[in-house]
Image (cartoon, rainbow, N blue to C red):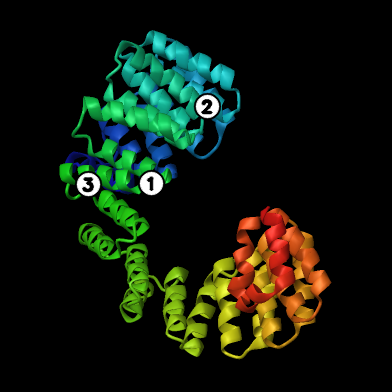
Amino acid sequence: MDADDFHDEDINSSVAKYEEMVKNKDWQFFDPEELENIIEYYIADDKLKKALSVVEFASQQHPYSVMFIIKKAQIEIIVGHFDEALEIIEHAESLEPANEEVAVMKGEIYLHLEDNKEAYSCFDRAIERTSEPNELILSIAFILQSNDLFEVAILYLSRILHNDPNNPEALYETAYCYDMMDELLKSIDFYQKLIDVNPYSSSAWFNLGAVYNKLGLFDKALEAFDYAILIHDSFSSAHFNKANTLVELDRYKEAIEEYDKTLELEGPDPITYCNIAGCYEKLLQFNKAREFYKKAVKLNSTFAEGWFGIGITYDEEGRYAEALNYVKRACELESDNTEYLLALADAEYKSGNDAEAEKAYTRLIELDPTLDDAWLDWSFVLYERDDLDGAADLLKEAIKTNPDISALYYRIVNYLYENGKVSEAKYYLEIALTLNFDEHFLLFEFAPYLKKAVEINDLIELYRK
């Protein structure tokens, strides 16, 4: 929740009345509910000092109200003062020992203090005291979820489902917990149970689609998003996720339509613009792609993905000098992004700046020595200079760090064989074939002439058997 959720005219009027009172030092009476709303307004707007000052004022006007002691503890939790929060909530407990809200907050504090056993004990006492256990258990489940205790949250939610197997909130939250635990099939089972109970739950269909996407079941995901949109046509996230799914299915024109619908509902957004641009790239419409990447950076000049995208469209058109400028801009914004650095190295090389390309490759290897594309591309720069020894030596260094990446071995075979070092080439080929026989096509992809090299093909056939 944030301050925008407090659109109620009475709340805004109460806040204005309180601020006017403070400004004029003209103390007035506020009823407890009015003060609680003002406190919540300031908490939602992240104005915690103001919220605390209202708590102090409220405690003076209503000294016997435990609610404001609870609010003070809540603020201490938000700022991370857990010991202070515990002291405050224990004072509230001494005043109202049977107050379940106090017990729940005390349990939350113990979670932050990493005393889970005591936390669960507090939660259980709260449930025993309340006349509305389902509502309270849901609140406890939210607290557990926010602390990444999804398995425990499921155990509490099962108390609801034991007596009310079709409780929609408990089904939804259980499915969400399984989703967060990456137990996706169980998550699907609970979302489907929820849909059986409430087939018009757009959020259930949406989340079901998201899980199917994670599992790579894109047709099923698409169907789920379609149902979510059918129920709630202005569900912008459903349109956005449907578009992402259509991209996975290579249905780029349809994806663009869904991204456009997202823009209609949510307004301009750099990520959506970039996604549309990506679709146009796949359709080989680089001018159109560039148009949307430019819209993204116009909206947010620090959005590195947009600058990078512009550079890639120029690269695809063979306009390497222009590509270089935009890729450099992306790297300035995200200096440790290996994807951008790899493209920068390539753009420098294509622009004839070999020394700068090598600097970029060196930086890449420093950042991530397991990045085989960086080693392979850098070795190719040396190969193109007819430095076969240098290219092979570089990959020998790469293999020291990455002894299990077969692509490195297959490429070094190419360099060694072309350099007349057939025995050494065969040595590395045997290792490559042992690591991953199926990737031997990489040999011929790089050097088709090797299809006629008898000693190479004999060795492949030996390992095939």
Please name the residue shown 44% across and 81% down the image: 316
Total numbered labels: 3
On the image, the x and y values in percent for residue 355 come to 69, 86
Q: Alpha-carbon neighbours of circle 3 within 10 Å: few (<14), some, or many (≥20)? A: many
Return the disc, 3 or 2, that comes first in the chain's sequence. Answer: 2
Please name the residue shown 59% across and 28% down the image: 113
Depth check, front residue: 193 or 356: 193
Residue for badge 3: 226
Depth check, front residue: 382 or 70: 382
On the image, the x and y values in percent for residue 383 come to 70, 82
**Structural distance between the alpha carbons of marks 3 and 2:** 42 Å
Q: Is residue 373 above or below residue 385?
A: above
Residue for badge 1: 213
Depth check, front residue: 47 or 414: 414
Under mark 3, the amino acid is Asp
**Structural distance between the alpha carbons of marks 1 and 3:** 13 Å
Q: Alpha-carbon neighbours of circle 2 within 10 Å: few (<14), some, or many (≥20)? A: many
Question: Is there a contact, CB below 8 Å, between mark 1 and mark 3?
Answer: no
Q: Alpha-carbon neighbours of circle 1 within 10 Å: few (<14), some, or many (≥20)? A: many
Quadrant the N terminus occupies:
top left
Question: Is there a contact, CB below 8 Å, between mark 3 and mark 2?
Answer: no
Return the disc, 1 or 2, that comes first in the chain's sequence. Answer: 2
On the image, the x and y values in percent for residue 215 come to 42, 43
Which of the two marks, 3 or 2, is nearer to us in this view? 3
Depth check, front residue: 193 or 8: 193
Q: Which labelled disc corresponds to residue 239?
A: none
Under mark 1, the amino acid is Asn
> Could you say whether the residue bearing mark 2 is in a helix, strand or loop?
helix
Under mark 2, the amino acid is Ile
Q: Which labelled disc corresponds to residue 109?
A: 2
**Structural distance between the alpha carbons of marks 1 and 2:** 36 Å
Q: Is residue 297 above or below residue 104?
A: below
